Structure formats: structure tokens, C-alpha cells
Image (spheres, rainbow, N blue to C red):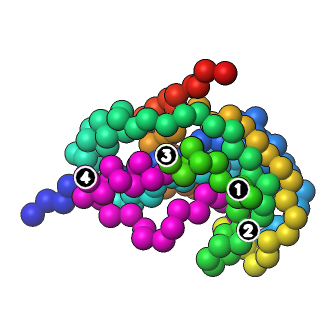
């Protein structure tokens, strides 16, 4: 009896490198306790798929090809604490296009038989794990979101790393 290989996958909005550097520098100045998320791993999860058969990757890519959503401005300006010590940046008001993108992904993933967490979508960017720190005042970070990504989470000797397995553009509206 052989077991088929699985990949730990999630769809997310990547944090641009310049913003990731600025966010990590701000976070580090706050002297928060816990495990800091590496700047290159900063992202806003849209849908966490967990362990998926490797053979499902092509179907996931094809599903993502059909997503239609406008590009949008994302502003993270609120510090929150979630679950067991996750300190996160979140938007005070989530952009409607972000919520639409997450909803489309959830609907299409469900049609593929992938069961997602049943809690309402709460957009956030995790800064720290295993932190006793409670939410406090946050700085404001903004960027234009013009794509979403499928990532594979991989454990390495240097810690968890996220490998981009696909990227899809968001529609740029006419201004």
C-alpha cells in the first residue's frame, strides 16, 4: 500500500518585498515576544487548503484561472491577537474586492470537494506566533494588490518557507 504525495497549500495575497521589509522593521521595533514570521513569508491568506494530493495541483491551477476580481488597495492599520498567540496586522475595513476574491476561491474550492475552515473570513497578516503580546496600536501599511498566489508551505532546516506554485493577475480597472 503506497501513500500518494501531498502538498501543504494555500492561496494568498503576497506582501510586496518593500512592504514586507517595512512591516518587519516596524514589528521588530515593537519588541514583541514570540516567533517572528520571516519577512519573505509575510502574506494575507485567502484560503488554507491544508495537505492536498500532489495530483490535484493542475485542477487547482485551472480553477484559479477562472477567478475574476478587480485589483484593489489594501491597508493594514489595526493590530489584533488571534487564537493562541498570533499577533497580526489587519485592515480596519476590508476592501470589498478582497472579500469577493476570498469568497470566489471558497466557492470554487468547495466545488472541487475541498473543505475550508467554516469560520467567517478574517483578513490578516501574521507577524508573530506564540506571542503573549496583546494587540496594541499599529502603524499603517498599504499597497495595491494586483495578483493572488498559490503557495506550498515547506519545512526546511532554516524554518518554514513558502514556494510560489502559481500566480494570477487581478483585473486592473479603467480610471
Q: Considering only order in the chain, which callout, 4 or 1, is on the residue closer to the N terminus?
A: 1
Disc 3/disc 1 C-alpha distance (Å): 15 Å
Residue that extends furthest to the top in the rendered view of this protein: 174
One can see residue 120 in this view: yes
Disc 2/disc 1 C-alpha distance (Å): 13 Å
Give the residue at x 36% y 33%: 65
Disc 1/disc 4 C-alpha distance (Å): 30 Å
The residue identified by callout 1 is 93
Q: Nearer the viewer, residue 85 or 65?
A: 65
- The magenta stretch spans residue 21: no
Give the residue at x 26% y 41%: 59
Q: Nearer the viewer, residue 120 or 113?
A: 120
Classify 10 Å Cα crowding around label 3: few (below 14), some (14-19), many (20 and above). many
Give the residue at x 26% y 53%: 111
Q: Considering only order in the chain, which callout, 1 or 2, is on the residue closer to the N terminus?
A: 2
The residue identified by callout 3 is 101
Q: Which part of the image, by quadrant, shows the C terminus?
A: top right
- The percent position of residue 56, horizontal first and vertical second, equals 25, 47
The residue identified by callout 2 is 80
Q: Quadrant of residue 97?
A: top right
- The magenta stretch spans residue 117: yes
Say whether marks 4 and 3 touch (CB < 8 Å): no
Disc 4/disc 3 C-alpha distance (Å): 17 Å
Residue that extends furthest to the left in the rendered view of this protein: 1
Find numbered disc 2 in the image and state the secondary structure of the residue it sits on.
strand
Tell me the magenta residue range. 102-128
The residue identified by callout 4 is 112
Classify 10 Å Cα crowding around label 1: few (below 14), some (14-19), many (20 and above). few
Amino acid at each position: 500500500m503506497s501513500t500518494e504525495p501531498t502538498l501543504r497549500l494555500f492561496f494568498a495575497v503576497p506582501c510586496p518585498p518593500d512592504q514586507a521589509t517595512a512591516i518587519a522593521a516596524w514589528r521588530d521595533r515593537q519588541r514583541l515576544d514570540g516567533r517572528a514570521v520571516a519577512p519573505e513569508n509575510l502574506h494575507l491568506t485567502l484560503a488554507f487548503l491544508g495537505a492536498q494530493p500532489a495530483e490535484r495541483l493542475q485542477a487547482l491551477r485551472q480553477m484559479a484561472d477562472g477567478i475574476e476580481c478587480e485589483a484593489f488597495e489594501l491597508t493594514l492599520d489595526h493590530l489584533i491577537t488571534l487564537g493562541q498567540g498570533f499577533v497580526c496586522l489587519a485592515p480596519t475595513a476590508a476592501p470589498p474586492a478582497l472579500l469577493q476574491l476570498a469568497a470566489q476561491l471558497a466557492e470554487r474550492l468547495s466545488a472541487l470537494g475541498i473543505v475550508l475552515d467554516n469560520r467567517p473570513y478574517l483578513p490578516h497578516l501574521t507577524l508573530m506566533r506564540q506571542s503573549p503580546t496583546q494587540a496594541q496600536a499599529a502603524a499603517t501599511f498599504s499597497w495595491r494588490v494586483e495578483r493572488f498566489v498559490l503557495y506550498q508551505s515547506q519545512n526546511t532546516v532554516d524554518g518554514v518557507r513558502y514556494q510560489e506554485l502559481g500566480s494570477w493577475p487581478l483585473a486592473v480597472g479603467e480610471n
